[in-house]
Amino acid sequence: MKQICVYGGAAKDAAAVYTDGAYEVGRAIASSGAGLVYGGGATGCMGAVGRGVRDHGGEVISVLPRFMTSYETLLKPVTRTIVTETMSERKHEMEALADAFIVLPGGIGTLDEFFETLTLRSLDRFDKPIVLYNGGGYFDSMVAMLQDQVQRGFVKERILTLFDVADTPEEAVRRALGA
């Protein structure tokens, strides 16, 4: 079974356009027969994608650092929980388990995960698909920023070819699975 790692914000106040979209990404993952690897949270986009997969019979693997077990509400039940000691170990474990990545709307933690994954792909550490789920146009300004960095000579144009942008949950999953 292919595993899709999903990064997304856990903000409890995230607008419904983002959490509803995240839930539908989860539903699409389960419908595709793939499993979910994610950060384990029960709130925001993170919780919504986990519920979307779980509610539709899919496999959910939570990966979280030990300190997060008391820091945030965790989604239960899940198929499997992996506890790490640090955030860095968490990211490494998620990257190792993943066959592809989907990035949902989120804050600085989500952006950190996206940019680390993109950096590793740009350095040829792996060749796994990375897809931004752009529900509500959330990533429009970030993509424009990357295009601007290319124009200014700070980033090689190749970086823009190392991720896809999808406007629907189904398209995000399809692109993540290479279909």
Image: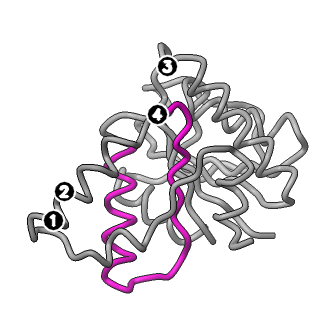
Residue bearing mark 2 = 148
Locate residue 47, reporting x and y percent. Answer: 62, 30
Categorize mark 1 by other alpha carbons within 10 Å: few (<14), some (14-19), many (20+): few
As drawn, which residue projects farthest toward the bottom?
A: 124
* CB contact under 8 Å: marks 2 and 1: yes
Magenta residue span: 110-136
Q: Which numbered disc covers residue 9?
A: 4
Mark 4 in CB contact with mark 1 (< 8 angstroms): no
State yes or no: discs 3 and 4 in contact (Cβ < 8 Å).
Answer: yes
Residue at 50% in and 52% down: 132
Real-space Cα separation, disc 2 to disc 1, in angstroms: 5 Å
Residue 160: where, in percent of width, then height?
36, 68
User: In the rendered image, which quarter is residue 74 located in?
Assistant: top right
Q: Could you say where residue 129 lies in the image, as x and y percent from the top left?
A: 55, 70
Circle 3 SS class: loop
Depth check: give the residue in front, 40 or 1: 1
Q: Secondary structure at mark 4?
A: loop
- At label 4, the amino acid type is Gly
Residue 101, by quadrant, is bottom right
